[in-house]
Image (cartoon, rainbow, N blue to C red):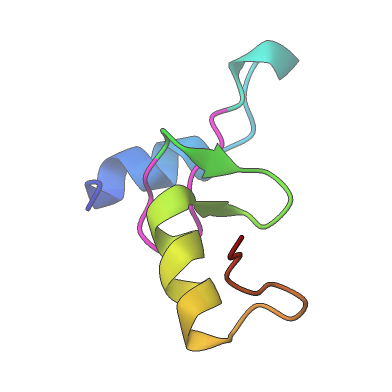
Amino acid sequence: MARKSIIARAKREPKYKSRVVRRCSLCGRKHGYLRDFGLCRICFREAANEGVLPGIKKSSW
């Protein structure tokens, strides 16, 4: 889990638009971030398996 100071710094308005750091809303992770859901890949998978995300289901082929 990311440190609280790093998460707080990412929430501030950046000086330049290109400096925005998108972080997971649950754990604060910055890598593997899915913009459509605002979650990292790990939290997305957990939420999808629990059925929290509407319209998302596990794929099988």
**Residue 3 is one of the magenta-drawn residues:** no
Query: Could you tell me residue 13's position as x and y percent?
Result: 64, 33
Q: Main secondary structure of the magenta part?
A: loop
| Residue 21 visible in the picture | yes
As drawn, is 34 to the left or to the right of 30?
A: right
Query: Could you tell me residue 18's position as x and y percent?
Result: 68, 13
Decide which of 24, 58 is in the foreground and name it. 58
**Residue 53, picture quadrant:** bottom right
Q: Residue at x 38, y 46 (%)?
A: 7
State whether residue 30 is above or below residue 41.
Answer: above
State whether residue 51 is above or below residue 17.
Answer: below
Q: Which residues are magenta?
A: 21-29
**Residue 26, picture quadrant:** bottom left
Q: Residue at x 48, y 37 (%)?
A: 10
Decide which of 23, 56 is in the foreground and name it. 56
Q: Residue at x 28, y 43 (%)?
A: 5
As drawn, is 10 to the left or to the right of 1?
A: right
